Image (cartoon, coloured by chain):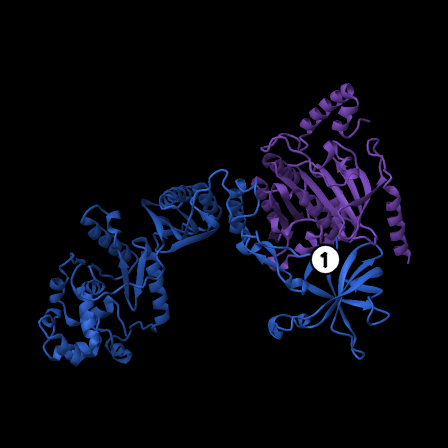
Amino acid sequence: MPEPDALAANQNRPAEALGIAALRDQVARLERAGTVPGPRGKLHPITLGAPELDRHLPGGGLSRGALHEVAGAGADREQGAAAAGFAALWLARLQDSGPVLWIVRAGSRAAIDLHAHGLHQQRLDPKRLILVAAKRDDEALWAMEEGLKAKSLGAVLGEIETLDLTASRRLQLAAEAGGVTAFVLRRWRVMERATRDAAQPIAAVTRWRIAALPTTQEIGWRVELTRCRGGKPGSWIMERADGSDEFHIQWERGQPERAAPLSGDLAPLLGGRSLAAGARTG
Amino acid sequence: MAADPRALACGIAPGMGVADAQALLPDLLVLPADPAGDLAALHRLAEWATRFSPLVAPDPDDGLMLDITGCAHLWAPGDSGEEKLLADALRRLRSHGFDVTGAIAGTIGGAWAAARFSTGGAIIPAGAVSGALAALPVQALRIDAATADGLQRLGLRKIGDLYPMKRAGLAQRFGNALITRLDQALGCAAETLSPLLPPPEHRIGLGFGEPIAAPEQVRRVSEILVERLARELAEHQRGARALKLSAYRIDGVVSTLAIGTARASAEPRHLFHLIAEKLERIDPGPGIEFMSLAAERTEIVTPLQSGMIDPGLIDLDEAAVSAADLAPLMDRLANRLGPERLARPVPVESHVPERAVKLAAPLEDQKKTQWPKLPPRPTRLLPNPEPIEVMAPVPDDPPITFRWRRILHRVTWAEGPERVAPEWWRPASSDANESQETRDYYRVQDESGSRYWLYRAGLYQAEKQPRWFLHGVFA
């Protein structure tokens, strides 16, 4: 298996890595995985500031100018609270390039259940947040496409219930054309539909599942990357203490990367986990 | 009682009693008067008449006043414009079944008198008002019947008869109203129209020889109107905040559509895009013969130069140059979904969580906004806290189980309380009663790891069962 980080590999074994890098480039171009030079030139990937996770992603981060999917697991499939928190972490890293358009599923402005103070605590600056209330999926999808045409936006997020291959491909193409990063936050009203829908293929570059985990920290999630174009799926336990900017990330499932071995940080992490487990049984 | 021409021919006169009229003509059709309906119809007609001039005032019971200053040249160049305009207006009104007369004069009173009391469509040239009115009866002065009767008893039948009279004497005998009306008619006293609609600052109109109805024709005309209006706005360094497109149909109906913009714009492509999206609201009916586009509200715009930071928009430095495309985006979203669907969150200094965020206009300046540091807050806050059933071992403690939306959650971890005091300075009626109670908020975690924000309403009272609510879900 080649290293996920072509740049790091370059420094180690130039000759071999160059060939691999060229291949990677070609594959990326073929797949148009958001790495095509857009109107902003070469698009650098978005990093989360959590090396264990960033390094797993092809190119060292999430592709800009591409479509990504975030969905909650369990009760969060409907509530979309953990999923919103995870998406907010990424969006916060994109705000330097422009405001974020967040299309909330709500019949009116008064029915918006997204809490700006809560997003602020996930590092998203509410000053650079524009909210749109969309009653139905078709409205939200339309608003997303319009938003993706506005090159001065940093990112567009839409809360969508049903998304098929065609609609997601439209979003992916719009994101590519404008160089604006798109997120769909899946939120289902009916659980049976959630189970059926979540397995449907869509044209997103990455697909994430976020499940709340018992923790005593500010956040505690199982983060699953179920699909990653040009990369491999993975699963992590992710925690962050109140007021801290450091994530504690533990690789959980899938094949661990050679280039990203579990570091010595593991010990305190495991401590946190056992503490959480204690809370669960207690 | 009013009567139509055929009734008049049979000897029925306006003002006649119904019984008398029916005696004269037993099968007379009598309809009850509908003053409100008449007035509404007059207003509709006034709106229709804005095709001739933006300044139209309904003049109840049966008149319309138009200020055609600067409009006549659109019908024909030179002096014949007024004549053409009047003929066109009268012809169109008659084709709709109205029995009308009209006149053009330099004063409101003069036109009123000439339209009602002179024969044929009179146009009184500038400076000839007193001469033209001299031969008209005194009733033409818009005076009440008693005054007119009084004047006639004195032998003053024509307006011209009043010219040599002493004004003081007339005023003493008949009141100042007569003098005012006379002065207004002759242009010695000022009189202004109070138009039905405030006149737009900029307006472009286009008439068609053949009525148009096809959507692509309407679209093309709208495009031309937008281009011309945008050019006019740009010349005045103004941008439109509100536009109104009016389509005057051959059946007298005016179909309109209004659009608003988040920021003043004189960019034809952007404005046309907004209009095009709503264009299906223009109902061409049997055909449109005239269309106009008015900028009802405009603001000064300074063209955004590249590299210049627009301070009013958003405090983004590098993005400010391209941020100009945000306003068009907001307009498109507002245009399709409604402006009330867009918002930017703004912090409010309130301890009551649902009041701690206000939703402001999407492009409001937020430079000075400071988001405070608060204790942990959920990413989802329910617009209305939902009542939950709880089991709490001790009334003052967080619950050990709670049921929300029919699902039972077992609490494995809890943190709190965070006490939120009621805002006593708010009137009790302002919201639900809940906001007038102290709340104790708890962050609780269920077995699955989901975290909820619960609160107990009201202070602990031994004899009362505490009420619990779920207010939010944490990330």
Mark 1: which amino acid? Arg
Mark 1 lies on residue:
B377
Q: Position of residue B283 (x, y in %)?
A: 43, 51
Left or right of A241 on screen, residue B82? left
Residue at horizontal 33%, vertical 48%?
Answer: B205
Asked which secondary structure carries label 1, the reply is loop
Of B448 and B394, nearer the camera is B394
Q: Position of residue B78 (x, y in %)?
A: 19, 47
Q: Position of residue A232 (x, y in %)?
A: 79, 34
Say if B361 sits above or below B221 in the image.
below
- Image quadrant occupied by the N terminus of chain B: bottom left
Chain letter, blue in picture: B
User: Do we see residue B222 in this rendering?
Assistant: yes
* Residue B195 placement: quadrant: bottom left
Of B30 and A11, nearer the camera is A11
Residue at horizontal 76%, vertical 63%?
Answer: B454
Of B85 and B78, nearer the camera is B78
Q: Position of residue A238 (x, y in %)?
A: 80, 46
Say if B424 sits above or below B382 in the image.
below
